[in-house]
Amino acid sequence: MVSLAIIGIGLLIMVGVMLMSGGRRRERQAVQLVVGDDSTEVIQLLGSPPNRCEVSSLSHLGNQFPAQTPRPTVEDETARLRRGTATRWVYPRGEGCVPGNGATEIGLDAAGKVLWIVPARDKQPLVYGAAPT
């Protein structure tokens, strides 16, 4: 009985390690994406998006901006990104459209180009292009 318990615990640990390493791999691949990349490049790096989501208000991006970004800038840029975003892709599978800690989220414009990226929610800041001048 004790042997079965030890084997079961070992299997659970192995599954946990595999799931955690998959998240780190996805995070490393997401960092390779660049604003302006085509959606086909996203699929090549991260696979088909498990969650294709509506745009929403994008207010959840407010705390994903780089540290020390002034609040007025955050509000202005969030509004600009909202206007330009046609769809959001959220990884991994099972995450749904409300990204959790460590999730990768990508905003695409109407042409299918990457407009913004959160490589790993609450771990790496939002990456986005500057407003046109």
Image: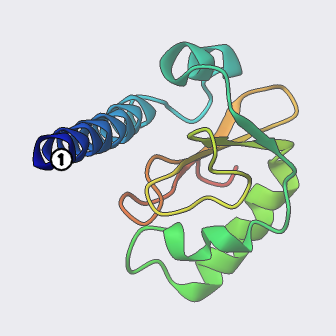
Q: Residue at x 28, y 44 (%)?
A: 12
Q: Which residue appears farthest toward the bottom when viewing the image?
A: 71
Report how many numbered discs are placed on residues in the image: 1
Identified at 69% across, 79% down, the residue is 75
Does residue 133 show up? no
Instruction: Say which residue appears at 72% left-offset and 74% top-offset.
Output: 59
Amino acid type at image mark 1 = Met
6 in relation to 29, above or below: below
Say which residue label 1 marks: 1
Q: Identify whether 54 is placed above or below 31.
A: below
Tell me where residue 97 sits by quadrant.
Answer: bottom right
Q: Dot 1 surroundings within 10 Å: few (below 14), some, or many (20 or more)? A: few
Q: Tell me if I can see residue 68 in this picture.
A: yes
Q: Quadrant of residue 39?
A: top right
Q: Is residue 97 left or right of residue 104?
A: right
Q: Position of residue 35 (x, y in %)?
A: 57, 36
Helix, strand or loop at label 1? It is: loop
Q: Nearer the viewer, residue 41 or 102?
A: 102
Q: Position of residue 111 (x, y in %)?
A: 84, 26
Q: Looking at the image, which residue is at 36% across and 39% down?
A: 19
Which colouring convention does the figure follow?
rainbow
- Front in this rendered view, residue 129 or 8: 8
Q: Nearer the viewer, residue 91 or 13?
A: 13
* Quarter residue 49 falls in: top right
The image position of residue 110, as x and y in percent, is 88, 33
User: How far across and down, in percent of the image, does residue 94 sit?
Assistant: 64, 45
